[in-house]
Image (cartoon, helix red, strand yellow):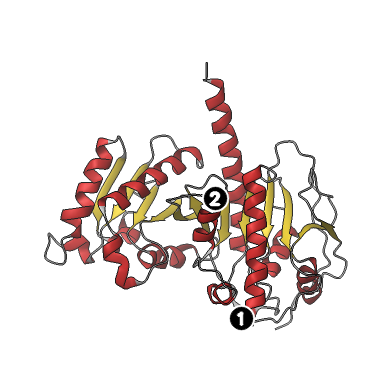
Amino acid sequence: MAIHRPTFQRPSPDRSRGNAPRVGITLGDPNGIGPEVILKCLHEPELPPMLPLVIGSPHVLRVHADTLGYSDLTIHVVDEVPETVPSDGITVLRVGEETPTVSFGAVTAAGGALAMEAVARAVDACTSGALDAMVTAPISKDAIAQAGHTAPGHTEFIAERTGTAQPTMMMVAGGLRVGLVTGHIPVSQIAAGITQEAILQKLRVLERSLTVDFGIEAPRIAVLGLNPHAGDGGVLGREEEQIIGPALARARGEGFDVEGPLPADGYFATQLDEGYDAVLAMYHDQGLVPFKALAFDRGVNYTAGLPIVRTSPDHGTAYGIAGKGMALPGSMRSALELAVVVAQNRARYEDAAQRVLP
């Protein structure tokens, strides 16, 4: 299949500070498709106004750009977050050594280390207020483990670096929002992680994020059961009666509009249009398998409960197609768009809160 190789002519909206959020975009694993989808997204004219700052290795970006045929791409290299970015080319906040190796499709410790160095730099820039949001291109959990990182992924690493005790992974595709009680843990540990306090904590984070980050007044949240058919009255498991149901009663006592526990196998087929603003699943695959089936090419991984704004495309490094020009940028584009929306919503919420102070 022939690959279309356009020249790189990024649109030139107003890059003055104004209301355009400053968005840091980490390159992800240098051997995966992260740099490719970033390049393709920044080439599109449909992106909302933002000040995009790629964070990573300029050399890695150049290798991917040359592979895509973006021979005329200008890369502006900076060592600190700039006040504005030029309208031509791409501005890159330099991370790592001068010319790191790019081996398309390879899982390497060096690639994992470089990817996470960029993430750490982006988190610190958001925490300091130099950036308004960050978007993370995919990393390899294997590669970052080889590099010595103990956090299993972006969510846990960013939570630890920002001192966040209870982050909540939320998958977003338009009005479809799926939160998780338990995240990246072995299946054998899921049942032990389902407690009343865990459910309540996730509901509190989810409700506040829906209100502040998504601008939804009085959000309605559906909550799934753990067992098949939500336990079938206790025949297939008693977590719904002993843990989930009582947790939801407590949540209603705190003023939350929640419904459940609902059977997970039927929810995504029959109840998506019931007016819920989000659904809380009990574990990773219970929520992400149907979500990705419905919205894989446009889904976004959003981390609720952080003091900073972080989004990510809903796909991995896709080593099998890295360097082939085949990666679809839809999910990365959605991640960039959502980062802008959430950053703007948070700014409006904070402005409103300040106005009512005496």
Asked if disc 1 and disc 2 are in contact, CB closer than 8 Å, the reply is: no
Placement of 11 over or under 1, stated as above or below: above
Kindly identify the residue that appears in the image at 25 percent across and 58 percent down: 225
Q: Residue furthest front?
A: 148
Q: What is the x, y in percent for residue 123?
A: 62, 53
Q: Secondary structure at mark 2?
A: helix
Distance from the alpha carbon under mark 1 to that under mark 2: 27 Å
In this view, 152 is above or below 260:
below
Question: Which residue, given by chain and number where applicable, does mark 1 sit on?
Answer: 107
The spot of residue 108 in percent (x, y) is: 63, 80
- Rendered location of residue 145, percent (x, y): 54, 74
Res. 46 visible in picture: yes
Helix, strand or loop at label 1? It is loop
> What residue sits 16% from the left and 54% below the top?
242
> What amino acid does circle 2 point to?
Thr
Q: Eyeballing the image, is 107 above or below 163? A: below
Residue receiving disc 2: 162
Is 246 in front, or is 114?
114
Q: Which residue sits at x=33%, y=71%?
A: 187
Which quadrant of the figure has residue 7?
Answer: bottom right
**Residue sitting farthest toward the top:** 358
Q: Quadrant of residue 30?
A: bottom right
Left or right of 108? Residue 77 is: right
User: How many C-alpha atoms fall within 10 Å of the one at disc 1: few (<14), some, or many (≥20)?
Assistant: many
